[in-house]
Image: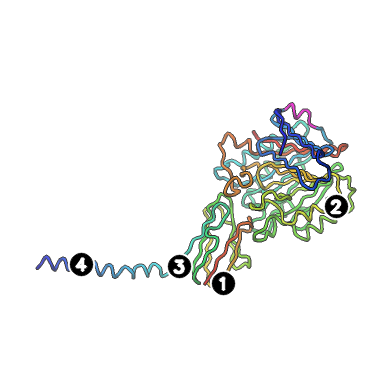
Amino acid sequence: MRKRSWILCVAASMVLALAALPTVEKSIAAGPPTVDVKIDNFSFTPATLTVKAGTQITWTNGDDIPHTVVSDAQSFKSKVLDTDEKFTFTASKPGTYSYFCSIHPKMTGKVVVE
Amino acid sequence: MPLQNNRGAILFDHNHDGIDRRGFLKCMAWAGTGALCVVQGGVLKSYSLSDPSHLDKAAKGELSFVQISDSHMGFNKPANPDVVGTLKAAVQKINALTVPPEFILHTGDISHLSKSEEFDTVDQILQSASAKDLFFVPGEHDVLEDDGKQYLERYGKNTKGAGWYSFDKKGVHLIGLVNVMNLKAGGMGSLGAEQLQWLEHDVRDLSKSTPVVVFAHMPLWNIYPEWGWGTDDSAQALSYLKRFGSVTVLNGHIHQTMQKVEGNVTFHTAASTAFPQPHPGAAPSPGPMKVPAEQLRALLGVTDVNYVRKRRALAVIDSTLA
């Protein structure tokens, strides 16, 4: 009997722990959703990004050459990003944002905010 | 395709199929070959710099000047951790020329990140050059943060707009153009309406026999649009130069030497004093090319331009730092 109740107790606490997990996840995700865009080999990856409004987008320059992230309509504009530097923009308003690197204008990308 | 003999001289005869040919003959002297090019009566001859006996035969002109480019001061990545050393080597090469150059042209990307200390370092190194007259045009790396304000304060005295200007030396009309400002998404280099208008006016009253040298950072011919290696409105600029008998266009930006002859216009791009970039399409991107240290200096260079007044020809020497 004693042994069984101990097992039950362990099982119950495991269930509780499992039940608690989503709560833990939720608290981690309490900040805005985040998405990363890589800058490598003079291109943005992914080149087209579709996100929910409020998503935080972070670009990271992996090239040995500086780049910028500038929206065509100037909705966002990074400073010059040297190697490994980042730029974050929170996409709050729905719409399509075309952007490019103002130093290497052949580099273009698009953010679709739903 | 270049015809190259076993002594390293590259000979072009673009009269063999008619002078009115609309197409072009393309000469690609990749960085590292080191070449002296002499254009004479429609024939372009290119001599290897690594063979001094070829240089001895080179035309001696009344005007000679040196082009350097893309020093990218501040760059410190593996492709060249010592851009100070390689720029100094370029200056030593200039100072070793038997005929001291009249002046030095720097075709942009003086700095890597438009920082004042980067410009300071370049200015300091160039002070030790034998030629005291220095002429610049900005590269995109020189106008990164402030719409080129700092560049103009340092190098743009007596220039127009974003830093364009012209001057005359010994009968040659030289024009410095700026094609790195206000770049448009998806586009290449850009001159813009205001500068084009100025250019048209600048050359309007020149006699057609005046040799014209145009220099700008990004190529004024479409080398590889996929990598943005060209200038969107360069055709308009070149249309104003059609009536001249001798036009030479000097560019940087692509960190390798290339030449092309099209009608009366000879195009040259200079090597970088900092780091080499891949041949068009030869890599996933035009980023810095890492080469073994012992090969690096052979891929960096100085261009020496020699103008022969009587023959109305320009000789371009592409020298490596090796």
Could you classify mark 2 by the number of other residues whose Cα lies within 10 Å: few (under 14), some (14-19), or many (20 or more)? some
Could you classify mark 3 by the number of other residues whose Cα lies within 10 Å: few (under 14), some (14-19), or many (20 or more)? some
Label 2 in the same subunit as label 1: no
Front residue of this view, candidates B229 and A64: B229
Q: Which residue is mark 3?
A: A33
Say what secondary structure mark 2 lies in.
helix
Q: Are marks 3 and 4 in contact (CB under 8 Å)?
A: no
Q: Chain of mark 1?
A: A
**Which numbered circle lies on residue A95?**
1
Among the two numbered marks 3 and 4 on one chain, the one whose residue lies closer to the N terminus: 4
Q: Chain of mark 4?
A: A
Foreground: disc 2 or disc 1: 1
Label 4 in the same subunit as label 1: yes
Q: Are marks 4 and 1 in contact (CB under 8 Å)?
A: no
Could you classify mark 4 by the number of other residues whose Cα lies within 10 Å: few (under 14), some (14-19), or many (20 or more)? few
**Which numbered circle lies on residue A11?**
4
Name the image quarter holding residue B259: top right
Front residue of this view, candidates A29 and B21: B21
Specify the color scheme. rainbow
CA gap, disc 4 and disc 1: 49 Å
Q: Which residues are magenta?
A: B52-58
**Quarter containing the C terminus of chain B:** top right
Please state which amino acid type lies under the numbered disc 1. Gly
- Residue B10: say if magenta: no
